[in-house]
Image: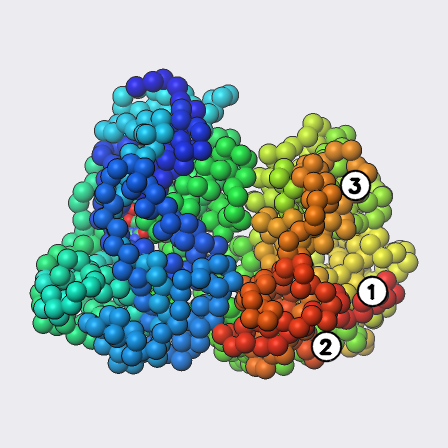
Amino acid sequence: MKSHYRVVVIGGGVVGTSVLYHLAKMGWSDVCLIERSVLTAGSSWHAAGGIHALNADPNIAQLQAYTIDLLPEIEKESGQNIGLHMTGGLTMAGTPERWEWLQSAYRTFQSIGIEDCRLVDVEEAVALNPIMSGDGLLGGMWADREGYIDTTGTVHAYAGAAKKNGATVIEHNRVLELNQTLEGWQVVTEKGTINCEHVVNAAGLWAKQVGRMAGIELPVSPLNHHYLISDTIPALQEIDFEVPMTVDLEGFTYLRQDQKGVLLGIYEVDHQHWMMDGAPWEYGFELQQEDPDRIERELILGFERYPALQEVGVKTWVNGAFTFSPDGNPLVGPVPGKRGYWSACAVMAGFLQGGGVGKSLAEWMIHGEPEADVYGMDVARYGIWAENKQYIKETTGQFYTRRFVMTYPNEQLPAGRPIKTAPAHADMTAAGCQWGQSWDLEVPLYFAEPGFKETPSLKRSNAFDIVARECKAVRENVGLLDISGFSRFEVTGDGAEDWLNTIFATKLPKPGRSRLAVALGEDGRLKGDLTLFNWGDGTWWIMGSYYLRTWHMRWFNDHMGANVELRDLGDEVAGFSLSGPKSRAVIERLSDGDVGVLPFMGCGAFDIGLLRCKVGRLSVTGELGYEIHCRMGDHATLRKSLLAAGADQGMIEFGFNALLSLRLEKSYGIWSAEFTQGYTPGMTAMDRWIDWDKPAFVGRDAALAERDGNGPAQVQVTLEVDAKDADASGYEPVWHKGEKVGFVTSGGFGHTLGKSYAMALVNADVAAQGTDLTLHVVGVERGARVIAPSPYDPAGKAMRA
Ligand SMILES: Cc1cc2nc3c(=O)[nH]c(=O)nc-3n(C[C@H](O)[C@H](O)[C@H](O)COP(=O)(O)OP(=O)(O)OC[C@H]3O[C@@H](n4cnc5c(N)ncnc54)[C@H](O)[C@@H]3O)c2cc1C
């Protein structure tokens, strides 16, 4: 064994071997995989081997599509048979809501380029899978690229192809210890010590312990999972094709053919965690005892859906564990604060997603960024709060149980909540606040009468009128919004200005001013749509999306300058914003300072009632507005003072649902919708905020190349939509004369203008105002047209008033 490699990958399951393969394939051949036992000795050997394209998260669906295309490639490259059976697949819906969702999901797949799907009626579905009963089903979706593989063969194919590209695989060698060094990591193994620059945790069921070796608490837990393999089914002997991989969403089961029997897998409603602190080191090719009683309900549904199962016996039971993160997506990427330590774990469906995980991680390590926007699986999407065991237990359990249960966009799930509440939480709850969760924090959605329950829906819900009322009050009078759910970073030190000038492409605000600020990656793609405050006393604030706190902090720290002090104020500072034409009258009553003459985008420190606050004159609603930041402990007092001062001004409290509607009427983009790390300044009109005269900033060369090139192929537009009872929400395809020309980034109802709007990325040649387009809203095609941005107050007079 060599004593030095550039990268050591820990774990020889499907994920570790895929990472190894991609690193070697992309040119890093000085890489080695260390496996405790033999390849496949974790979850990988006993997986059902199913591969399918459908996933509710479009980014994860793309990852799966990449993996499915890769499988035949690695078979060819390695010469190792992977037993690929591309049977095609069916996903069946058994309730009207699910059928509606499936039709909508079908359009999402079209949006993201997964074209080999189509909707099928029950008759056709039963013809495609003749052992399936159509009882109670309403329709389904067929996908060409679904089927199953031989799991052991696939792991060996990744490893074999990696070795052909120069990588090394060492089996029967457990990693015992990890020590950080100046260069990277010292990996202490049973067979000796290796020094390396990068270490990858691909330890699957043991990921928790391999994290702890480096002082990292990963939010991951194993859960048990059952499948059975039936005896021979006579009906399958009579047909000359294999039945497709079939998912019965309402039955919590998936099925594929296994020789002349079937494999039936069950997502257990009554879920069961297993070894939350990681599997025992000696565990390997064992399984857990099957527990049919615990899964009786799902088994009954399965045996009814496939009646032939009632006639034959069960040949084999498998009850094995695999790992989940709180939202079910993998944990991938550089672990914040641990230079050279990479996570490639919590991959729930390694045979489906492992290819995409390996590709993204290898690109990230080699080029500094993955090609795709992988925020959805970035390990930095969680913070320290997610290390809590009870949180991990509740959320992973909820995800598992709901794996095949529909979650509506307006649905609030209970697991792992509440964690953090701002101090005014109890008073706001008493005032009718309905809460959502952003990261660890409870954030206000809207204020309703006591006893109000929102109906989960893909369409407009029964909260529609409540949100409309809040929007109207903001536009006509004044509204109060709890903005504890913004991130705030404090930047100080002699090097602060130089550093900010480097990481932001925007001109810095003068003392006493704030400014929208764009951060770019080295490749010129977006890294942040932030707001910069220059408080005038050598202190700067960066403000942005609360849920990106760790993600942004990692980026800042990776690009840190000299003599700069950076602090995340997210747990120290809270606040409220006032918006609406009467907001000045309210704030002036509480201060004898010059707060009333603050110019648009001005900022400063003021007395507000009994409190000392930082105030910025800006708002996301497009109205005259103030963002008032206070110490966390002052939050409840600030609210009371503001409510008292606004009592005779028609002031109401409002939530983020109204804010989303109001910002849409202004065509203000938001992160994770209009802005992502997959898009460029030119596509999103963020180039307006770039200071091209600045000699240097991160991403400058790439941004200049875009500016001086032929222009982006797709650009952001605002659409007015002929919607009826539902609005666009995101990823719906946009059509022009029958041809797909883009997709919706976000949408909703503009309550004060009484129209449905969407923002979309469309081909530049259909972006002109007045162009007629169509888009699918909850599966139904609706007319739409490109309009000028900011349908409300395009000249911005209200916010500058
Ligand atoms: C019953 C069941 C059915 C499933 N069906 C499917 C399916 O149909 N499709 C699908 O895509 N997925 C399926 N899965 C999930 C799939 O098995 C996992 O997603 C996948 O195996 C995860 O692979 P991995 O490489 O992350 O982890 P693992 O396979 O657990 O591999 C981790 C490896 O790391 C090694 N290791 C750990 N610690 C150390 C150490 N300290 N030193 C050296 N080596 C170490 C272990 O020995 C192990 O080999 C199923 C899982 C189960 C349980």
- Pointers 3 and 1 in contact (CB under 8 A)? no
Of marks 3 and 2, which one's residue comes earlier in the chain? 3
Residue 796, label in figure: 1
In what element is the residue under mark 3? loop
Q: Distance between the residues labelled 3 and 2?
A: 37 Å
- Disc 1 residue type? Gly
Q: In the rendering, at what x and y percent does residue 592 appear?
A: 89, 58
What is the quadrant of residue 205 in the picture?
top left
Residue 589 lies left or right of residue 213; in this view the side is: right
Q: In the rendering, at what x and y percent does residue 400 appear?
A: 35, 59
Q: How far apart are marks 1 and 2 (CA)?
A: 16 Å
Which quadrant, please, contains the C terminus? bottom right
Residue 242 drawn above or below residue 140: above
**Beta carbon of the mark 1 residue lies under 8 A of ligand 1:** no
In what element is the residue under mark 2? loop
> Which is closer to the viewer, label 3 or label 2?
3
Which quadrant, please, contains the N terminus? top left
Q: Can see residue 751?
A: yes
